[in-house]
Amino acid sequence: MIIGHFVRRRISQGHREDFYELRDQRFLGSKEFIDDVRRELKERPSIFYDISIQELIESVSIALKISEDLFYSNTHHRPGALGRAVVGYLGKDLANLPFKASAGHFNRD
């Protein structure tokens, strides 16, 4: 992978200020490095899974030990909010579900 190669090649150089210059509000590194990362990301195929929001809720509930009822709670109870956030993130990342879909499922904006 390009990033691993980049790090291994430069680790012996010690601290370098240019590694702390943020570019495009997302990247650290030289213009060449940023171009390499962008090229690699474009070449990588997007793979999404057919996962329903309910399947995500069940899995997140088990993994985080949060009752599914808390996901639907009208309060801002932290475990419920965390569960909803994780479902939204995983829905977007794994199934390409829009955040609006998970928010709507939980009757949120």
Image (cartoon, rainbow, N blue to C red):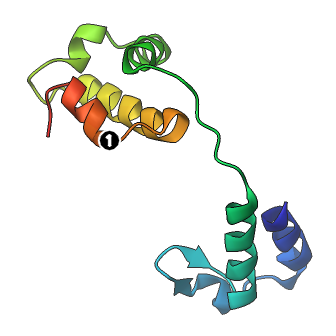
The kind of residue tagged 1 is Phe
Residue 10 occupies quadrant:
bottom right
Task: Note whether 51 is above or below 98 in the view shown.
Answer: above
Q: Tell me where residue 2 appears, x and y as whole percent.
A: 83, 66
Residue under the point 51% across and 41% down: 93
| Residue 104 appears left or right of 33 | left
Above or below: residue 16 compared with residue 88: below
Residue corresponding to mark 1? 99
Is disc 1 placed on a helix, strand or loop?
Answer: helix
In the rendered image, the vertical position of residue 83 relative to residue 21, given as above or below: above
Q: Give me the residue at 75% from left, 65% from top.
A: 40
Image coordinates of residue 30 in percent, x first then y, are 70, 88
| Residue 11, horizontal then vertical, whole percent | 85, 74
**Above/below status of 26 relative to 44:** below
**Residue extending furthest toward the left:** 74
Work out whether residue 9 or residue 55 is closer to the camera in this orientation and state it: 55
Callout 1 crowding tier (Cα within 10 Å): few <14, some 14–19, many ≥20: some
Q: Is residue 12 left or right of residue 36?
A: right
Residue 25 locus on image (x, y percent):
46, 78
Image quadrant for the N terminus? Answer: bottom right
Seen at 42% across and 11% down, the residue is 58
Count up the numbered dots. 1
Q: For this view, does 46 lie left or right of residue 56? A: right
Q: Quadrant of residue 60?
A: top left
Q: Residue at x 14, y 40 (%)?
A: 109
